Amino acid sequence: MAAAIAQHALGSRYRISAAGLYLASGIDKRASAVLREMNIKPKRLQRKAVKDLNLDRFDLVIALGESVHRHLKSAGAKHLRLWKIRDPYFGQIATYRATAAALASRIARLQKDLA
């Protein structure tokens, strides 16, 4: 969901990748519904496991939680930022909406920083 929102907001000027500590089997139907509410087409994202990425190839790495941040830091990620944004997985659709709003807000601030 984060990558889709970022790609929508930032456009094709930036290459956005999504990765997790564990490889997911597809986009969650609640995330997909929230993205459609935001007029973002949920695409099939090329998700990867963090362990399979060459983190040196990224200009900016954003962790959405402290445990992921610790993992990325120990893996040697440079240009690492922590955004404390709640993982909505165990929540209801309202939790996904709140998470999407928090992501959109942070991405908007990031967009201003990159300009």
Image (tube, grey):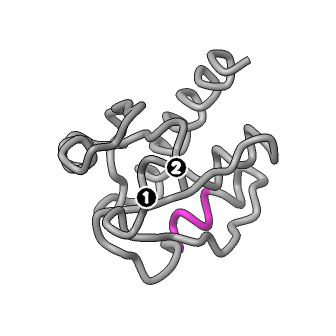
- Disc 2, SS: helix
Whether pointer 2 and pointer 1 mark residues with C-beta atoms closer than 8 Å, the reply is yes
- Disc 1, SS: loop
Residue that label 1 marks: 54
Q: Residue 31 magenta-drawn?
A: yes
Q: Which disc is residue 57 wearing?
A: 2
Quadrant placement of the C terminus = top right
Magenta span dominant secondary structure: helix
Amino acid under label 1?
Answer: Asn
Q: Which disc is residue 98 wearing?
A: none
Q: Position of residue 53 (x, y in %)?
A: 42, 63
Q: Position of residue 30 (x, y in %)?
A: 51, 67
Q: Residue at x 31, y 66 (%)?
A: 51
Q: Nearer the viewer, residue 93 or 58?
A: 58
User: Badge 1: few (under 14), some or many (20 or more) residues near its Cα, within 10 Å?
Assistant: few
Quadrant placement of the N terminus = bottom right
Q: Which region is colored magenta?
A: 29-34
- Examine the image and state in which quarter residue 24 appears: bottom left
Q: Residue at x 24, y 50 (%)?
A: 75
Q: Residue at x 33, y 51 (%)?
A: 87
Q: Please indicate whether residue 25 sits to the left or right of residue 58 in the image.
A: left
Indicate whether 5 appears above or below 24: above
- Examine the image and state in which quarter residue 62 appears: top left
Indicate whether 76 appears above or below 17: above
